[in-house]
Amino acid sequence: MSIIEDLNARKVLDSRGNQTVEVDIYTSSGAYGRAIAPAGASKGSHEVKDYPIKGIDESIRIFKEKIGPELIGMDVLDQKRIDKVLHEIDGTENFSLIGGNLAIAISIAAAKAGADYLGLPLYRYIGGINTLSLPVPVANIIGGGKHAINGTTIQEFLVITYADKLRNAVFTNSEIHKAVGKKLKDKFPNISIGLGDEKAWVASLSDEEALKILYSVIEEFRSKTGFKIYPAMDFAASSFFINGKYKYKDKELNTDEQIEFVEKLVDEYDVKYVEDPLDENDFDGFAKITSKIGDKCLIVGDDLFVTNKERLKIGIDSGAGNAILLKPNQIGTLSDFLETVKLAKESGYSTVVSHRSGETEDSALADIAVGINGEYIKTGTIGGERTSKLNQLIRIEEDLEE
């Protein structure tokens, strides 16, 4: 046993400069864990509440008055009980009393302290002896939507590199990011090209222009490296679904037309990953698009599922999607997260562990992705809050090779 002796919560900054919460856990054995919660901008309406109505200060007040005293004396190795206590103190279905960001920071800090006590890396503590594989990195290259002003309507144009080693996929993705940046600067020589929240390039492009530029660079790197490299897209379609129509800069589409548009892009540009192509409540539409192109690419539910086991069950029953995006702070505790992962794997859904647009230097997401044998990890391309995860994956790869 390793008994929790003390806990602390403080306000720190995320990558957007917004306040977030960091938690420290100290134990009787000297084991220690620290975790920071990230924050999303493009949030599904069904995910847990990041903070109470009164904000982050209210979360920290409740932590000091109720949560900390309740957790002191508990065994840090008893992850499920710790997470159950967080639910009991909160008493709501969506962590609206204490805040899901506080809950996930406590939960992951506890896991880190448990791993520290046992002398294990976090990925091994989570996955045990079944940790055998590394996720394929999905890298954000061109951005828009809620992550960038004046960018594309579609939120993310990404790249997936299947390489001989994870580190080579990471390095190839970063070189593709540079090459796309050069193409954009050549295209707009008198305009400063910026970076969005996730350090993807932002330019005044139509969606198809962005995809064409990305695809042209991918073709160059396919022949240069010999790796299988494909474009990917996160539509975040709920953000531009207005009054029953998908409203792009140059067109409005109904649901059937949106499905046809996505299918066209998948066929023309060899897209292998499509995230949130339809509104977050359209399970029937997701089922339809999955039946049409699910054999060609991943149809990934993010806002549709919000890492929630009950929403995933609806998707499974209706045939909606064939992959799930997994964000720990969408559901509030590591135990809840792992239950959703278990259901996804049992049901044949591909698993994509994901960062948030407002990220932190905490690298735990990399260990979590490896610990669950996640097939993919979506964690950006450049920027310290993104590379902290990528560099940790490189270290883990080296560890697993020994």
Image (cartoon, rainbow, N blue to C red):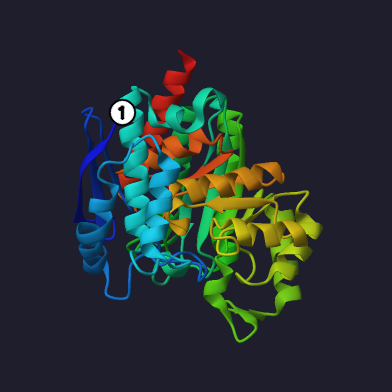
Drawn side of residue 18 relative to residue 371, left or right: left
Q: Which image quadrant for residue 2?
A: top left
Whole-percent x, y for residue 153 in the image: 52, 70
| Identity, as a three-letter code, of the amino acid under mark 1 | Asp
Screen quadrant of the N terminus:
top left
Q: Which residue is mark 1?
A: 116
Q: Nearer the viewer, residue 233 or 237?
A: 237
Look at 39% across and 31% down and name the residue there.
122
Q: Which image quadrant for residue 136?
A: top right
Q: Nearer the viewer, residue 180 or 168?
A: 168
Whole-percent x, y for residue 123 in the image: 44, 31
Q: Nearer the viewer, residue 18 or 143?
A: 18
169 lies above or below 217: above
Drawn side of residue 314 relative to residue 166, left or right: right
329 lies above or below 97: above
Q: Nearer the viewer, residue 14 or 48?
A: 48
